[in-house]
Image: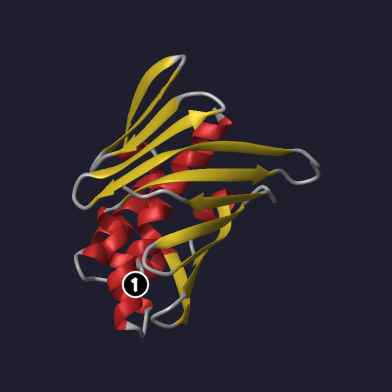
Amino acid sequence: MNRLRLIAVALPLFCAAAAAAPYSPSDAALAAIRKALDASASWEMTRTFKDSPRALKSSGTVVCKVGEGITWTVLEPFESKVVMGVDFMSFEDEDGTRVKKLSDLPHYDELRKAVDSLVAGDASLFAKVFTAGFEGSDGAWKLTLVPVSGDIRKLLSSVTVEGRELPERATLENGDGGTSVLSFVKRP
């Protein structure tokens, strides 16, 4: 279940990072990041744990659709799926499917509402959840998100997303001292 929790944290952040584009001074970078809001990609992730020399590797696909949500499918080392819809999150693995209302998952509900408000053109709620820093130009860019909320800081201490045309790499510094690095590869 720990892997599903990590994926559930990454789900809204994939789109949150893309949606944070209003912090970008570059029109080309802004267009590229917004394009990720309706994107799909294959991904590979390496997760390291505090005080552990062993890394956990996984791979799968992610599909993000504005107004619908995100589907995060793990293909290796075992199959599972996490879907964050408008008002629910579902977890599917060898134990079956579990569906939760986002209102019962306050961290994720807060993230989803912040992203939704930003996509709708209001950055004020997003700014209550994250501080954002942007570096780069039309060629390459880097967006750093740092949680403002203490509850979300328990899950992660920062998120850095780097890319060119679309996000290519995301680094999540987890609240437990570990790090997750997601590389977005093949895109249809």
Secondary-structure class at tag 1: helix
Left or right of 173: which side holds 92?
Answer: left
Q: Is residue 16 above or below residue 99?
A: below
The quadrant of the rendering that contains the N terminus is top right
Report the side of 86 relative to 134 (left or right).
left
| Location of mark 1 (residue) | 21
Image height check: is 141 above or below 96? Answer: below
Left or right: residue 2 compared with residue 11: right
Q: Residue at x 51, y 57 (%)?
A: 170
Residue beneath the point at 27% across and 72% down: 31
The residue lying toward the viewer, choosing from 96 and 101, is: 96
Location of residue 109 in the rendering, given as x and y in whole percent from the top left corner: 34, 47
Residue 175 at x, y = what percent? 62, 51
Q: Quadrant of residue 52?
A: top right
Residue drawn 37% across the image and 79% down it: 24
Up-down relation of residue 134 to residue 79 (above or below): below
Q: In the figure, residue 77 lies in which quadrant?
A: top right
In this rendered view, identify the residue nearer to me: 17 or 76: 76
Can residue 22 be seen here? The reply is no
